Image: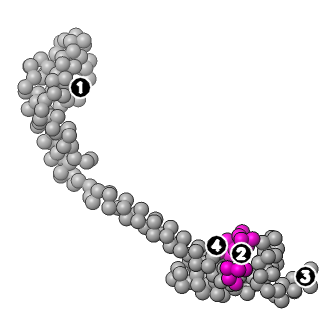
């Protein structure tokens, strides 16, 4: 076997690439040994980083292994073809990185610059509560009382019925009518459309 491996360094690049196309790992190893410096040098110039250059070189040699059968001598030497594989892999890698960067920049640009402060959020809540109170004042007293207990005191319909000594159905009916009127209240409708992010 050693004698068989010993002949590979004597073969031309064209012979080696043909053997690589047929799946010959020893021929691939000989091509690698012969051209790895030039390929690493180009990868390093393309990436500007030692680790990225090594990764690119590995990707390029993998591509050479997989597509050795596509090599055509009339298009140039094996070395030129291999360097073009590195160049193309490097360009694809740079494009991918640039696309990833653009996607991240776009996401950052579309993200809110800052979250509303706690003071702002509290002020907005107070403003909404005051608008609801004003709108409640426009309702008939029976509906106003039921909705005020539900909204400001966080009481359930059953608790409101018990507190006001009313049947549960009456409380629900007054609640439904009052909410319908509030939904149509112009000031509350504007407030719902202009709600700030939370």
C-alpha gap between disc 3 and disc 4: 28 Å
**Which residue in the protein does label 3 denote?**
4
Q: Do the residues under discs 1 and 3 have CB atoms within 8 angstroms? A: no
C-alpha gap between disc 1 and disc 3: 91 Å
Q: Earlier in the sequence, mark 1 or mark 3?
A: 3
Which x, y percent locates residue 103? 42, 62
Q: Is residue 153 visible in the rendered structure shown here?
A: no
Q: Callout 4: helix, strand or loop? A: helix
Q: Is 194 in front, or is 37?
A: 37
Residue at the spot 23% in from the left edge and 16% down from the top edge: 172
User: In the rendering, which numbered label is found on residue 59?
Assistant: 4
User: In the rendering, which numbered label is found on residue 155?
Assistant: 1
Residue 70 magenta-drawn? yes
Of the residues tagged 1 and 3, which is closer to the observer? 3
Q: Is residue 151 left or right of residue 4?
A: left
Q: Callout 2: helix, strand or loop? A: loop
Binning the other alpha carbons within 10 Å of mark 1 as few (below 14), some (14 to 19) or many (20 upward) gives some
Which x, y percent locates residue 75? 67, 79
Of the residues tagged 3 and 2, which is closer to the observer? 2
Classify residue 167 by image quadrant: top left
Q: Is 159 in front, or is 18?
A: 18
Residue at the spot 50% in from the left edge and 67% down from the top edge: 96
Q: Earlier in the sequence, mark 3 or mark 4?
A: 3
Of the residues tagged 2 and 1, which is closer to the observer? 2
Q: Is residue 7 above or below residue 158?
A: below
Classify residue 159 by image quadrant: top left
Q: Is residue 35 left or right of residue 93?
A: right
């Amino acid at each position: 076997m050693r004698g068989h491996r010993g002949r590979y360094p004597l073969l031309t690049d064209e012979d080696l690439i043909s053997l690589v196309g047929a799946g010959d790992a020893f021929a691939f190893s000989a091509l690698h040994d012969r051209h790895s410096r030039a390929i690493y040098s180009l990868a390093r110039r393309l990436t500007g980083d030692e680790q990225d250059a090594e990764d690119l070189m590995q990707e390029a040699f993998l591509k050479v292994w997989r597509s050795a059968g596509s090599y055509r001598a009339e298009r140039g030497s094996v070395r030129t073809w291999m360097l073009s594989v590195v160049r193309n892999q490097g360009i694809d890698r740079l494009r991918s990185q640039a696309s990833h960067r653009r996607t991240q920049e776009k996401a950052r640009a579309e993200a809110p610059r800052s979250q509303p402060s706690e003071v702002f959020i509290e002020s907005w809540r107070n403003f909404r509560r005051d608008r609801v109170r004003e709108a409640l004042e426009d309702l008939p007293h029976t509906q106003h009382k039921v909705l005020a207990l539900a909204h400001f005191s966080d009481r359930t319909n059953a608790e409101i019925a018990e507190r006001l000594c009313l049947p549960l159905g009456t409380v629900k009916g007054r609640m439904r009518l009052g909410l319908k009127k509030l939904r149509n209240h112009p000031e509350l409708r504007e407030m719902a459309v202009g709600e700030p992010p939370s």
